[in-house]
Image (spheres, rainbow, N blue to C red):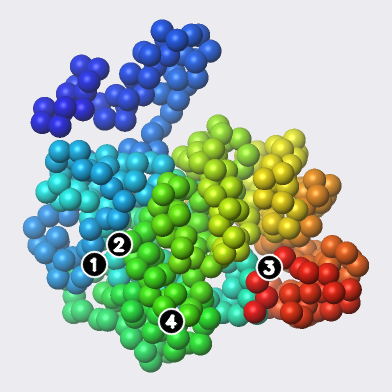
């Protein structure tokens, strides 16, 4: 787009920059060949994940209050394109003209500078068992101080946290009321009003985690990629204080941003939401290819322990053939020791009309994963299914970790080895 006039290089007015890029690609593919043309046309017709909210950035009093609170920070990985900016945190790569708001709702272009509005202003925090992330092979039985802001890089039809993930920071926080900065000791309870005006800056997050004796901080609930700068600064400080950092993420992040924050990350839980590009688009407005690349990148960063979760949604991600291809890919690219959690779908948000995942579908998926060679396969969100969340030693086959909901009820691992046969069990056991 011509930055001054708003006219695209294709000469069309009134379309977004990304539509223009798609339009040009379709035209180019038309020259290149029929198959490519069909692919491009299909993609050009899809809703665009990088669509932004033109002219939606806060102005005037709202902007002044947000700055006064300290809830604004210049973005980390972005390009200046004249007065426009391009965020390089996630594959959406939003391009924002002055006054625009990003796809994740957290970033704005203010006078040619990219700012995040999701800094030091969590809309949720909680002390969770690490098993709730879920991470089963990382400091089992410990707690993790968990935080989230508004906003997300995805648009999942089944989002269980859509009330924060599909909101702007301004919709979850109130900068106009009296300021309230949370520091230890943490009050026994907080009102909704307290939460809306509360600030929790990186040093406060670390201090609260320490005061609660949590050995780790989890960046979760919505997606830490969408509040990257807040996550980054907190991770860095937490590392200095010898606390662990856990990312709970959809895994949609640009490689450079991942490697940059990855130096401070100790563990991750990555949602692999399916194994088909079109399904990923329909269900999440995301790209499977980007997630697979990031899983491989995480696999190459040996200091980061990570586990993969796959939610099986009837009619979307319950195809046995697709599950087989996914498990084969995981075994081939991440090895047999990477834990895989199958999770049961419950009807909600835009998929409230679908039934819960049948238990037999989950059991069949576990069989497929084990047949593909994966050694640690779990089933979550199902009560009463024997061994759904049990870790078995891959050598002697005995149950070595048993869990009940989020509690560890048996632990036969010592020094990272099976107590019965001394086989090393993949993970970080403390
Ligand atoms: S992190 Fe947000 S602003 Fe940056 S590219 Fe992704 S969706 Fe756009």
Relative to the observer, which residue lies in front, 373 or 141?
A: 373
From mark 1 to mark 3, how far is it between C-alphas? 36 Å
Element on which disc 4 rests: loop
- Alpha carbon separation for disc pair 3 and 4: 22 Å
Which mark is in front, 4 or 2? 4
For the point 33% across and 38% down, the residue is 51
Determine whether the residue tagged by mark 2 lies in a helix, strand or loop. Answer: loop
Reading the chain from its start, which is encountered first: label 1 or label 3?
1
Please report the residue visible at 40 percent of the width from the left and 52 percent of the height from the top. 257
Q: CA distance from mark 4 to mark 2?
A: 23 Å
Q: Earlier in the sequence, mark 1 or mark 2?
A: 1
Q: Tell me if mark 3 has few (under 14), some (14-19) or many (20+) residues whose alpha carbon lies within 10 angstroms of its own.
A: many
The residue mark sitting in front, 1 or 4, is 4
The residue identified by callout 1 is 71
Q: Tell me which residue sits at (25%, 81%) in the image.
A: 180
Q: In the figure, is residue 27 to the left or right of 389?
A: left
Of pointers 3 and 4, the one earlier in the residue sequence: 4
Which disc number belongs to residue 241? 4
Whichever of callouts 4 and 2 sits on the residue coming sooner in the sequence is 2
Where does label 3 land, which residue? 427
Most extreme residue toward the left is: 60
Q: CA distance from mark 1 to mark 4?
A: 23 Å
**Residue for badge 2:** 118
Judged by depth in the image, the label closer to the viewer, 2 or 3, is 3
Q: Residue furthest bottom?
A: 185
292 vs 150, nearest the viewer: 292
Q: Are dots 2 and 3 in contact, CB under 8 Å?
A: no
Q: Nearer the viewer, residue 199 or 397?
A: 397
Contact, mark 1 vs mark 2 (Cβ under 8 Å): yes
């Amino acid at each position: 787009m011509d930055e001054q006039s708003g006219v695209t290089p294709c000469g069309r007015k009134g379309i977004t920059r990304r539509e223009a890029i798609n339009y040009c690609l379709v035209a180019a593919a038309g020259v290149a060949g029929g198959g490519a043309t069909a692919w491009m046309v299909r993609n050009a017709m899809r809703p665009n994940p990088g669509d932004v909210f033109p002219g939606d950035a806060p102005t005037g009093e709202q902007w002044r209050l947000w700055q006064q609170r300290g809830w604004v920070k210049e973005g980390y990985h972005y390009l200046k394109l004249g007065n426009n900016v391009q965020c390089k945190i996630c594959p959406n790569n939003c391009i924002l003209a002055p006054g625009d708001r990003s796809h994740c709702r957290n970033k704005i272009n203010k006078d040619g500078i990219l700012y995040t509005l999701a800094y030091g202003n969590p809309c949720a925090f909680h002390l969770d068992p690490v098993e709730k992330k879920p991470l089963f092979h990382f400091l089992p039985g410990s707690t993790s101080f968990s935080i989230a802001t508004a906003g997300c890089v995805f648009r999942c039809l089944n989002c269980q946290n859509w009330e924060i993930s599909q909101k702007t920071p301004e919709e979850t926080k109130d900068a106009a009321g009296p300021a309230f900065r949370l520091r230890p000791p943490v009050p026994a309870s907080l009102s909704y009003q307290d939460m809306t005006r509360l600030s929790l800056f990186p040093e406060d997050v670390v201090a609260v985690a320490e005061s609660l004796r949590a050995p780790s901080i989890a960046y979760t609930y919505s997606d830490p990629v969408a509040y990257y700068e807040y996550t980054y600064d907190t991770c860095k400080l937490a590392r200095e204080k010898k606390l662990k950092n856990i990312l709970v993420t959809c895994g949609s992040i640009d490689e450079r941003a991942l490697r940059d924050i990855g130096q401070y990350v100790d563990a991750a839980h990555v949602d692999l939401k399916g194994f088909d590009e079109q399904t990923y688009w329909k269900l999440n407005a995301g790209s499977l290819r980007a997630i697979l690349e990031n899983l491989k990148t995480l696999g190459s960063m040996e200091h980061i322990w990570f586990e993969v979760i796959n939610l099986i949604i009837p009619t979307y991600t319950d195809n046995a053939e697709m599950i087989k291809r996914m498990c084969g890919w995981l075994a081939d690219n991440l090895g047999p020791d990477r834990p895989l959690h199958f999770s049961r779908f419950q009807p909600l948000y835009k998929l409230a009309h679908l039934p819960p995942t049948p238990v037999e579908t989950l059991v069949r998926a576990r069989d497929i994963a084990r047949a593909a060679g994966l050694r640690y396969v779990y089933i979550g969100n199902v009560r009463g299914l024997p061994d759904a969340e049990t870790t078995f030693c891959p050598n002697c086959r005995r149950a070595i970790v048993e869990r009940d909901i989020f509690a560890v009820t048996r632990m036969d691992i010592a020094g990272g080895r099976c107590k019965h046969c001394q086989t090393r069990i993949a993970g970080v056991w403390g």
